[in-house]
Image (cartoon, rainbow, N blue to C red):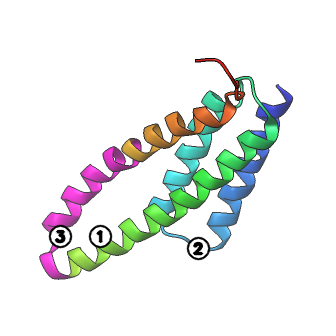
Amino acid sequence: MKSMTLGLAVGAFIIIFSYFLRFADEVFQAVFVFNLLFVCMFFPLNGSLRRKMAALLVGNFICFTWNTLFFMFVNAVSTYAGGGFTALLAFISPFLNLLWFVSFWSTSLTFLAEPESGKW
């Protein structure tokens, strides 16, 4: 319970940090959903708190980078292609975020496993 509370506190800090830096709303929403899902599903598991926090910080960095680049891509394409393409990308964006959420979460589960030597 202590680690989950700490994870929620760090997630809240990162969300507030992203709000004050004036990132796009889409980036803010994706970071919020990522932190909420990651802390609720990952922090109750057994493992080192240090590894969990490191995985959360790496995930937040990936989230900021991915969503900022995607937001810039959407703005560039909508400038040249018009508003119809923006609606399509607004529909596709949550599914693309879900793809990397799930893959990052499943990959980060390997960080919690204790290494066992000599057992095949």
**Quadrant of residue 28 within the rendered picture:** bottom right
Judge from the rendering whether residue 57 lies leftward or rightward of residue 37; answer left or right.
right
Q: Which mark is residue 91?
A: none
How crowded pointer 2 is (Cα within 10 Å; few <14, some 14-19, many 20+) is rated as: few
Residue shown at 55%/53% (left/top)? 31
Q: Is residue 8 visible in this depiction of the protein?
A: no
Mark 1 or mark 3: whose residue is earlier in sequence: 1
Q: Which residue is mark 1?
A: 74
| 99 vs 107, nearest the viewer | 107
Q: Position of residue 67 (x, y in %)?
A: 44, 62
Judge from the rendering whether residue 11 lies leftward or rightward of residue 88; answer left or right.
right
Q: Which residue is mark 2?
A: 22
Callout 3 amino acid: Gly
Query: Which quadrant of the rendered structure holds the C terminus?
Result: top right
The residue tagged with tag 2: helix, strand or loop?
loop
How crowded pointer 1 is (Cα within 10 Å; few <14, some 14-19, many 20+) is rated as: some
Query: Which quadrant of the rendered structure holds the N terminus?
Result: top right
Mark 2 or mark 3: whose residue is earlier in sequence: 2
Q: Position of residue 48 (x, y in %)?
A: 79, 34
Callout 2 amino acid: Arg
Callout 1 amino acid: Val
Q: Position of residue 9 (x, y in %)?
A: 78, 45
Judge from the rendering whether residue 4 lies leftward or rightward of residue 75; answer left or right.
right
The residue tagged with tag 1: helix, strand or loop?
helix
Residues in magenta, as a range: 80-98
Q: Furthest residue to the right?
A: 2
The residue tagged with tag 3: helix, strand or loop?
helix
Q: Is residue 21 magenta?
A: no
Q: CA distance from mark 2 to mark 3?
A: 24 Å
